[in-house]
Amino acid sequence: MNDFADNARATTRALRDLFAPTPLQRNAHLSERFGADIWLKREDLSPVRSYKLRGAFNAMRKALALDPTRRDFICASAGNHAQGVAFVCAHFGVRGRIFMPVTTPEQKIMKTRTFGAGTVEIVLTGDFFDETLAAARDECARTGAHFLSPFDDADVIEGQASVAVEMLDEMGRAPDRLILPVGGGGLSAGMLSYLQAVGAKTALTLVEPAGGASLTAALAHGAPTTVPITDTFVDGAAVARIGNLTFAALRDVAPQDVLIAPENRICITIQEMLNVEGIVLEPAGALSVDALGQIADQIAGQTVVCVTSGGNFDFERLPEVKERARKWQGLKKYFILRLPQRPGALRDFLDMLGPGDDIARFEYLKKNSRNFGSVLIGIETDDPANFDRIVERVTARGFGFRDISQDEVLSDFLI
């Protein structure tokens, strides 16, 4: 066992002052569905409902070991890292200043403040995270406070490796395959480094959201590169640029072992885990489970561990989750209907719908001319094939009918 493995095990022992190992649970539903022995490493059941507590604890522990008089720490985060830092600030009795974007939901601010138990100050600054991060770093430079990175830090990576230490201890052996979400890379870098250090022969599958696939881009370029964030739904993993230190640990991962998960498909997984298993997962926390379907042909008969990395889900997002899920399943679409301005025109359109079709949205937009008006209409159905029938009937009647479901600009503006 090398130094990294020894340090990771020491960190794991130290973490027991904060919380017991998170459960490693066999999931009968997923095991039966995929014909494999599937286990969930439940990081969503940590005290702050994510693994981020581990890295924050280790980084702060190491900083205090070097300078026991240090009492000022700063981080920038709008999510799980902020809550982890707040928790360990309360544990060590030090002052924390947590920089968050002005747009951060009040619920996240309140949770962070609660975990800090009077030891943290919330600083709201910047409309975007990059502005918030710059302000936090500037404040560190000005005051000499210690900056706690969310992922690109050796002590943070070492702290996240404790998930792998617990997994092997709880299972008693190495799994055939480990599936991990990837954002900045701290969790995957830590767990992979530990498995390599102890000689575990475990296949690795990494998953990142389509709206921020920074590891895929880094592997293609041979170095970290900045990618545009095209969808922020998976806010815990949609990172524009993977860390330099984390990529150093991941640079030899085969590109085919990095999967990209569409955000709308992830919503189906969130719904299924909640409705079938009663497990609340945030979008990033559902990534590893969501990937099972993509590699179903590779995992039959294997022992597989999925790390459910977080459960900080705001239930006010459930309508959005349902909407995205139905879009992915092809059961809901939005159209612009050009409706003739004559008596009976609307009834004519309604008669074209079948018994499994339902109007979920109907909004008169504007009158284009004396003879026609435009309507935004959302239709839900019980079979995706029904939409072909609807379009065929409407077109045959000469009504203007435009599908805007995949038009991001129009959808954002109108829906």
Image: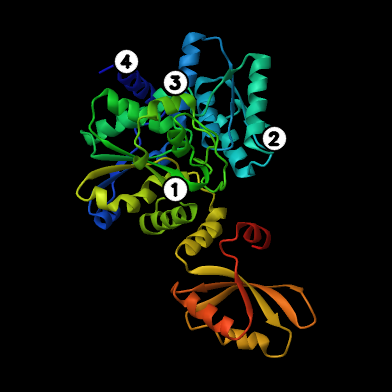
Mark nearer the viewer, 1 or 3: 3
Q: Is residue 84 left or right of residue 171?
A: right
Residue 3's label in the rendered image is 4
Q: Residue furthest bottom?
A: 343
Alpha carbon of mark 4 to alpha carbon of mark 2: how far? 40 Å
Instruction: From the top left corner, tell me how far across and down residue 201 is, in percent.
Output: 22, 32
Q: Nearer the viewer, residue 279 or 321?
A: 321
Seen at 29% across and 34% down, the residue is 167
Q: Residues within 10 Å of mark 2 (few under 14, many from 20)?
A: some
Q: Nearer the viewer, residue 178 or 37?
A: 178
Alpha carbon of mark 1 to alpha carbon of mark 3: how far? 27 Å
Residue 191's label in the rendered image is none
The amino acid type, in three-letter code, at marker 2 is Gly
Alpha carbon of mark 1 to alpha carbon of mark 2: how far? 28 Å
Name the quadrant containing residue 411. Answer: bottom right
Alpha carbon of mark 1 to alpha carbon of mark 4: how far? 34 Å
Q: Residues within 10 Å of mark 3 (few under 14, many from 20)?
A: some
The amino acid type, in three-letter code, at marker 1 is Leu
Mark 4: secondary structure? helix
The amino acid type, in three-letter code, at marker 4 is Asp
User: Which one is earlier in the sequence, the residue at label 4 or at label 3?
Assistant: 4
Instruction: From the top left corner, tell me how far across and down residue 406 is, in percent.
Output: 56, 61
Instruction: From the top left corner, tell me how far across and down residue 232 is, in percent.
Output: 56, 46
